[in-house]
Image (cartoon, coloured by chain):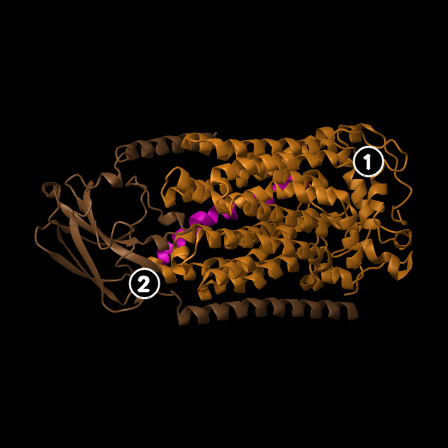
Amino acid sequence: MAIHKIILASFLVYLMIQFSHGATKERLFSDLEKDALDVTAKPSRQGVLDAGIDKLSITWKLSSTAKKQANFKTIKVKLCYAPVSQVDRPWRKTENELFKDKTCPHKIITRAYNKSSQSFKYTLDRDIPTGTYFVRTYAVDAKDHEVAFGQSTNEAKTTNLFSVQAISGRHKSLDIASVCFSVFSVLALLVFFVNEKRKAKLEQSK
Amino acid sequence: MAPNHSNENGSIGSSLHGVTAREQIFSFSVEDGPSSQAIRSDDPTAKFALPVDSEHRAKVFKPLSFAKPHMRAFHLGWISFFTCFISTFAAAPLVPVIRDNLDLTKTDIGNAGVASVSGAIFSRLAMGAVCDLLGARYGTAFSLMLSAPAVFSMSFVADAGSYLAVRFMIGFCLATFVSCQYWTSVMFTGKIIGLVNGCAGGWGDMGGGVTQLLMPMVFHVIKLTGATPFTAWRFAFFIPGFLQIIMGILVLTLGQDLPDGNLSTLQKSGQVSKDKFSKVFWFAVKNYRTWILFVLYGFSMGVELTINNVISGYFYDRFNLTLHTAGIVAASFGMANFFARPFGGYASDVAARLFGMRGRLWTLWILQTVGALFCIWLGRASSLPIAILAMMLFSVGTQAACGALFGVAPFVSRRSLGLISGLTGAGGNFGSGVTQLLFFSSSRFSTAEGLSLMGVMAVVCTIPVAFIHFPQWGSMFLRPSQHEERSKEEHYYGGEWTEEEKSLGLHEGSIKFAENSRSERGRKAVLADIPTPETGSPAHV
């Protein structure tokens, strides 16, 4: 039967996906070299930043305590959630297995590794949610595996955090269209109802 | 043009003559006035495209036909219901975007899920009454067109509270389930009602699966036009909103309440009497079978609704699938409805042909219990292939049970058919709210444990089906009554009318129904020589 074939095909696909994940399963965050890069992230102004408008000044350079810099090929700079923004939100959970870890989902910039100090002026994307953040940079080797990282906050993720307020996503034109269609819907129903009652009354009076 | 009244009982007693097929009556709606005047045939049933019984309900089900009025009502009914399922669960696949826009927590999302199914508890109850009093067309149209504003108002939502309120209000439209089942129950005869209701319900329920694929696609297309994600998801809700308005207009212009015409026309012309709401309500509530069905449906449809809200996240978290893949898995649960629920209805009909109502009750118990057992297995499965296998078997069992239950429901009452459909439907949503609240809204149980516990609760709550007993047909374990009077269908359905109402002839529709329901005796009905009952036959035969 067709449905059995579909089930069998999906088993095979999922098994293949499982196996392809297997190669990356053992890589852990705790294996990465800590504080290999000195990172600073300065907001363009005080207070809560507005997504889509305000900027972050991000700088990173190799730390004096770094050991594995021979492997560094690329630097990935990411925006990460502070613990307070992870409470009661399991989709932002910090996990030790790198492929499961959801702390840093927002990419800022990726650049080739350079020994000298690097900087980037980042305008907060319009799809950044409301929350409290810090910046982390991952040093990645030629096989696209993370080997080291640095972050703009301390290990407990309590210092140098900044807050962002998301855009509302609402638009005046959307609001107006919404009201128009809603009114049309209710009116159309009323018109039909009244009309039919009238016709039925006419039938009865004949 | 004045309808044709017969005068043997005076004008009041002729109120139901439109339904007895002994009169020349309209079979088309009022707008066709001039043409129907010309039709004068001795066989009123010749006007229908399908063969009909004495109540003008179709005896044959042709899914590919759109013939007026029976098949057209079927298609309008199930597509309306399908549209409402799309709207109610439209938020579920977009939650990853919505939760970022509105800064939602897991608790907020869980509560909104409960709210999305809770509104329908009340609206399904009200819908039963609306159908009995205003007809299925207006029931469907009200539901579609009055909840469309709620769908559009997603563009205003700014925080968790307003999100929950809007999902609650959108959920009201699930009342179309009741109007759809009511519409098919008055359009199709008892022998095939299991299959017809199963198809209508199942294909409508598919909306819960289709939405998991449709909404992400619409969202993606809107983003391509340049909108940011936080605006695109709001605009995406316009699609279900448009679908609702379009379906509402189609139902009102193309549909017909009853095989013989629209309810308001038949009522005004005296051909269908207006029943009193208090009586309809009392007979529905007084019947203990209604409440057993309420609980049963809470653990077949209720479980299905809960899974619609929960399963995508379960596969995403436990087996680390991508959101896209988890969505496909979630969609396939809902899509199994396409054949699973009609299969349940069909199985119920086949069992009725062989064993009568007892067969229907056993079929219901077996399907629902097996489904619940597979739900327990799903919670305990720790590898992905086993989990998917368990989920598919669970979906077939539970959805078939939904279909089988609505093979039984039309026989519980004739007078209060609409309200009983409404109460049973409300039970489905109630069960979903309860299971989501108990097992999926706190950190007490992991989602896997919650699934297994929900399965156990479903097994236990399916046992009451053994207590449904019809004096004329028996129950799962007891034979039909041997009593001379009580063993007749007419006694059961006639019992819903007082002697005074019977003397006015108001119960004649129920008597017709009782005669047609003789098929629920199983094979014995064909063999037995059953005399025509003294009460209830129209006087001018």
Q: Is residue A38 above or below residue B312?
A: below
Q: Tell me the shade of chain B.
A: orange
Residue that mark 2 sits on? A164
Q: Which of A90 and B92 lies nearest the eye of the viewer?
A: A90
Picture coordinates of residue B351, whole percent (x, y):
68, 31
Do labels 2 and 1 touch, CB within 8 Å? no
Picture coordinates of residue B427, whole percent (x, y):
65, 47
Picture coordinates of residue A52, whole percent (x, y):
29, 65
Does residue B275 appear in the picture of this structure?
A: no
Mark 2, secondary structure of its residue: strand
Q: Is residue A137 above or below residue B343?
A: below
Q: Is residue B199 magenta?
A: yes
Asked whether, in this view, residue B166 is left or right of residue B184, the answer is left
Residue that mark 1 sits on? B472
Q: Which of B183 and B230 lies nearest the eye of the viewer?
A: B230
The answer to which image quadrant residue B264 occupies is: bottom right
**Residue type pointed to by label 1:** Gln
User: Label 2 neighbourhood size at 10 Å, few (<14), some (14-19), many (20+)?
Assistant: some
**Chain drawn in brown:** A
Question: Which segment is the magenta one?
Answer: B193-222
The residue lying at 53 percent from left, 69 percent from top is A184
The residue lying at 54 percent from left, 62 percent from top is B148
| Chain assignment, label 2 | A
**Residue type pointed to by label 2:** Val
**SS assignment for the magenta stretch, majority:** helix
Q: Which of B223 and B302 lies nearest the eye of the viewer?
A: B302
